Amino acid sequence: MNKLQLKDRELKIIPVIAASDSISHAATILGIAQANVSKYLADFESRVGLKVFDRTSRQLILTPFGKALLPYINNMLDRNNQLNNFITDYKHEKRGRVTVYAPTDIMAYLSQHVIAKIQDIGDISLSLKTTNLTRKAFFEGVEFPEDCDILISNAYPEDESLVASFITRYAVTAFASNQYLAKHPISAPEELEHHSCILIESMMIDDANIWCFTSASGKETHNYRVTGNYVCDSTQSSLALARNHLGIVFAPGVSVQKDSSPSGLTPCFPEHYEWWLDLVIIFRKREFQPWRVQYILDGMITEIRQQLAKARQQSG
């Protein structure tokens, strides 16, 4: 048996005709041409192979089949309305969970400077989770966790169907306390092998990290194998150890700006040996995510870019 193809526009006219008793009245209520109402009804009856209405000289009267059919049609139309309302609410209500992933140091920045600036989030529940990059992510792409809605990262996604919006670039270099540098002076990355470096767990290769620096001239990039007694799972904890004079840390300059004092951290090298990282925000295409995610995403991007623009004005 061939499955009937029921068209929504045909189903909608049947209850209206039944309530108004005539094609012309139904056409007026529906706001469509009388000829089209007649055609839709005729097409439906022809496809079903049964008459829905008996036609008299003055009105249309439901046949026994039509009377039995009408409750099913009304029920189907009600369910369609419920489905449409659910989709509309899902797409436009400020309700539900939005999960944001970022490396530890970036998450600390978001928590302190960005999240509180997103106003009027309604009943949205924000879930903030940390995910630290593995070294292979820079070459193969970063994974997008299954429960993730928004991922802020230094690497682009391995899944090419995701959107990766570039935010900015920032420099990473070697820092240490003034007390450490006074005892263990250093002038170039080549000397790192003779120093105690504070390592990041996600960057471990055997018992070492590989730190990348662009030459002072900015023309060449070199990798340096570094070792040390301390291994941390985040930049924040490695900075805390460095502040206690336990070694050299590889960190973003923005993470140690507040330490630019005699008792804080300072760049190890007199010249600008740096590694530049991209900061990108990764998310699904707009058509594949609810409106609540887009609301939080737009708020985060706007606030971060405003803060970056303000920082550039102040530095300029």
Image (tube, rainbow, N blue to C red):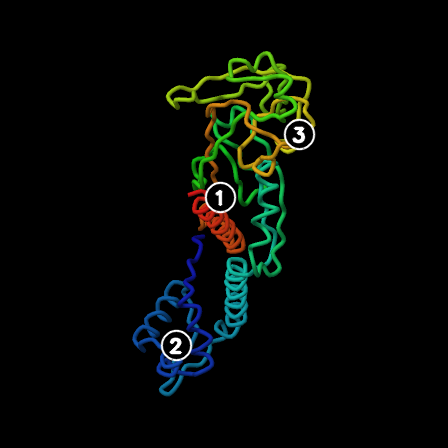
Q: Secondary structure at mark 2?
A: helix
Residue 234: % across, % down: 63, 31
**Amino acid under label 2?**
Leu
Q: Quadrant of residue 102?
A: top right
Residue 204: % across, % down: 60, 20
Report which residue position mark 1 lands on: 283
**Amino acid under label 3?**
Arg
Q: Residue at x 38, y 62 (%)?
A: 47
Q: Quadrant of residue 160?
A: top left
- Of the two numbered discs 3 and 1 in the rendering, the one whose residue sits closer to the viewer: 3
**Amino acid under label 1?**
Phe
Q: Is residue 115 above or below residue 139?
A: below
Label 2: how many Cα within 10 Å (few below 14, some 14–19, many 20+): some
Q: Which comes before the other along the chain, label 3 or label 2?
A: 2
Q: Is residue 282 above or below residue 38?
A: above
Q: Secondary structure at mark 1?
A: strand
Determine contact: label 2, label 1, CB under 8 Å.
no
Q: Secondary structure at mark 3?
A: helix
Q: Is residue 223 above or below residue 145?
A: above
Label 3: how many Cα within 10 Å (few below 14, some 14–19, many 20+): many
Tell me the CA gap for discs 3 and 1.
36 Å
Residue 246: % across, % down: 68, 22
- Of the two numbered discs 3 and 2 in the rendering, the one whose residue sits closer to the viewer: 3
Q: Is residue 28 above or below residue 242?
A: below
Report which residue position mark 3 lands on: 243
Quick check: can you spot residue 242? yes
Q: Which comes before the other along the chain, label 2 or label 1?
A: 2
Number of the label disc, if any, that sits on residue 30: 2
- Of the two numbered discs 2 and 1 in the rendering, the one whose residue sits closer to the viewer: 1
Label 1: how many Cα within 10 Å (few below 14, some 14–19, many 20+): many
